[in-house]
Amino acid sequence: MARPIERDEPARPAQAEAPPAPSADRAGKPPASGRDLRLDLFRGLALWFIFLNHIPNNVANWITNRNFGFSDATEIFVFISGYTGAMVYGRQMAADGMIVTSARILRRAWQLYIAFIFLFVIYLAEISYVVGSFSNPLYVEEMGALQFLSEPDVALVQALLLKFRPANMDVLPLYIVLLATFPPVLWALRRKPDLTLAASALMWLVATSTGWNLPAYPDDRTWFFNPFAWQLLFVFGGWCGLGGSDRLSRVVQSPAVVAACLAYLLVSLLVVISWWWPPLEGLVPPAIGDVIYPISKTDLSPLRLVHFLALAIVVVRAVPVDLPVLRSPLLAPMILCGQNSLQVFCLGVFLSFAAHFVLNEISGTLFMQVALSMVGIVLMVGLSALLSWYGRVEREIAARKHG
């Protein structure tokens, strides 16, 4: 059976990666340091997966989670963004009020918007240079840059309106919209959390059933990540960050719930494997396939949503917040990347296209695929380490000045 799920293809990336979320001080019941490193750990892991998935014909991307179930790194990022955003800005709203906190949230959304424009310009310059230097016009269509080269003035205006995005950049506009509209949502979550979550679920249901979405450029397209659907995961993350996770602790700790989650993850794994492994072809009966396919990423299909929730419950049980290995040097590089997600994401976009070019034009051997994947991750870790060092130095200087 052909792959019925929307997969990650270069022209319309299913795994874009991810924008930054405000750093959280804790989640659940944190260790004495007050920081839940799991948030940074899984955000960093997703960034690595995103980079690998954005390199076509790369054997290394077979280790990523998109090949083992219905959901992928996008769900992780959106949920963590809502979770940490609600915790950080929720405390600020309680201390400083609605107006001041809303201004801070909008300032952060503006910073993300500037980052998107910067990434858009540099990324298209990279693509245009490769196309011109190597006379290979296929990159233009493959990377979604055809409209820019044919109508640069129109495409630039559409990019400023967040309607035009080259390949691998779709999730950043999604996060900008979710964050820009977050102030009233956060206000409602702090006062009527359950009602707010119910309203969010209703919006998701309407969007998935009617196709309600924002227009994109060219005019026959819509947003790859439908914000009216994906807001549910963002709001659910915020609901959990403001105390909902504590209320769900009994559910998470239930052996029956964990068993059901493991069963669902296993079924999802078998279904996904059946798309590319001939012995399992036809595993899903046509009658069931007609009901569950397509497993839409654009509208956050229920199967994707349930898969993420099941995976989250299993991970929370398997990786407690005080697990000693979270503070080991082995996981430090991944955590560093998660703590500098915006910069690492932008670098990953550039590196993935550069690796794609090398594999196409120079060598596509198995060794080269693995080598480029490893080099890209090392560069991402190096950038995050540099940024963390600089931030630490700045804080020390500021402390001495005020000391």
Image (tube, rainbow, N blue to C red):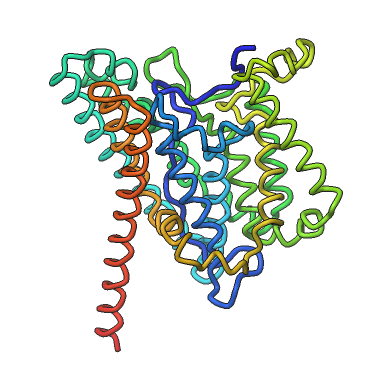
Q: Could you tell me residue 93's position as x and y percent?
A: 53, 64
Q: Is residue 149 left or right of residue 106?
A: left
Q: Could you tell me residue 29's position as x and y percent?
A: 66, 69
Identify the residue at image location x=33%, y=34%: 352
Identify the residue at image location x=39%, y=20%: 11
Identify the residue at image location x=56%, y=57%: 86
Question: Residue pushed farthest bottom?
Answer: 403
Residue 104 visible in the current orientation: no
Quarter containing the C terminus: bottom left
121 relative to 387, above or below: above
Which quarter of the figure has residue 213? top right
Q: Is residue 247 left or right of residue 358?
A: right
Which quarter of the figure has residue 156? top left
Residue 164 visible in the current orientation: yes
Quarter containing the N terminus: top right
Q: Is residue 18 left or right of residue 363?
A: right
332 relative to 11, above or below: below
Of residue 155 and residue 43, the one placed in the foreground of this image is 43
Question: Residue pushed farthest left?
Answer: 133
Of residue 309 and residue 205, the one placed in the foreground of this image is 309
Of residue 176 and residue 125, the one placed in the foreground of this image is 125
Q: Could you tell me residue 394's position as x and y percent?
A: 27, 72
Which quarter of the figure has residue 267? top right
Q: Is residue 361 left or right of residue 176?
A: left
Q: Could you tell me residue 317's position as x and y percent?
A: 71, 56
